[in-house]
Amino acid sequence: MLFSQRKKMKVTLLYLFVLCSAQHSAQPETWQVKGIAGKSLSFPERVLKSGNLLYGDLGKVAHVYPGKQSNTNLVKRFKNRLHWNNVTGFFTLSDLQIDDSGIYTVANADEEKMTHAFQLTVYYVLSKPQVTVHDNISCTVVCSVENGREVTLSWYRGEERLNQTSSPDLNITLSLPLKVDEQNRESYRCEAANPVSKGTGVVPHSCIESDPSKVTDGDERTPGSLLIAVICVLVASGLVGLAICLKKRNRHSHAGGAKRYTRT
């Protein structure tokens, strides 16, 4: 009796193991693929005779019939953008859009009867980051770029990364300030990157580091400039006084002459 129970337990465990293995094998491994907005992408799995392409919750979006025929207009959103090559056997999606991202499954109904899943993520090509001078005196610059999916913005000095920023908010502009050494200005670069592209910005030539003690701003004046201002005021006052004296003297001279030649 005990031997019979052990045998039944072994059979049960073997059945459960086979069932779990079958369920695990039915779930295809998902491969990561990256696309660029506006470009085309071919899913790297062949369907030479018959099969389907499925997309997320939409299910079947393309079907291949025996005899090298296909119907790739099953879903309106992919109309005229999804194609099947009857020579290579690849499905190709053209004019990629950001919202084309998702899981695509190639179901091969040929002799192998295999399925392959692909996680497609579509990215924009990044624009070149802009570097502007924020403060000439301290030589502080700001690098900025329009944010997007998985975008990072970094400052480098040579091969050393000095700082980095990113944000999950895709509707903002990423900005990253940095105080640079003007003597080694050319060693700095700002780099914006995502998984499919990168762009680089450099420090403008207009960033000129100065000695703040030699810079005057508004009413702030150095002692030397104040002394010069005082001298100028005194000189100007003396000239004005001299002019007034000369003018009065001329008036008296004219008046005396007039009286001298007046007839009685």
Image (cartoon, rainbow, N blue to C red):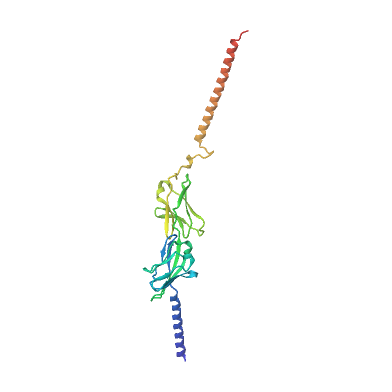
Q: Is residue 250 visible?
A: yes
Locate residue 139, reporting x and y percent: 46, 46
Residue 78, x across and y down, in percent:
46, 65
Query: Can residue 115 be seen here?
Result: no
Q: Quadrant of residue 245?
A: top right
Q: Nearer the viewer, residue 102 or 244?
A: 102
220 above or below 55? above
Task: Please say if 215 is above or below 152.
Answer: above
**Residue pictured at 48% horizontal, 65% vertical:** 77
Quick one: 75 or 12, which is closer to the camera? 75
Q: Name, please, the residue furthest toward the right.
A: 264
Between 142 and 184, which is closer to the camera in this rendering? 142
Task: Relative to 220, say whether 64 is above or below.
Answer: below
Q: Nearer the viewer, residue 156 or 117?
A: 117
Question: Can you name the residue that lies furthest to the bottom here?
Answer: 1
> Residue sitting at 52 percent across and 34 percent down?
226
| Up-down relation of residue 118 to residue 233 (above or below) | below
Residue 227 on image: x %, y %: 51, 33
Residue 19: horizontal and vertical position, in percent?
45, 80
Q: How many marks?
A: 0
Q: Quadrant of the C terminus?
A: top right
Res. 256 image quadrant:
top right
Residue situated furthest top in the rendering: 264
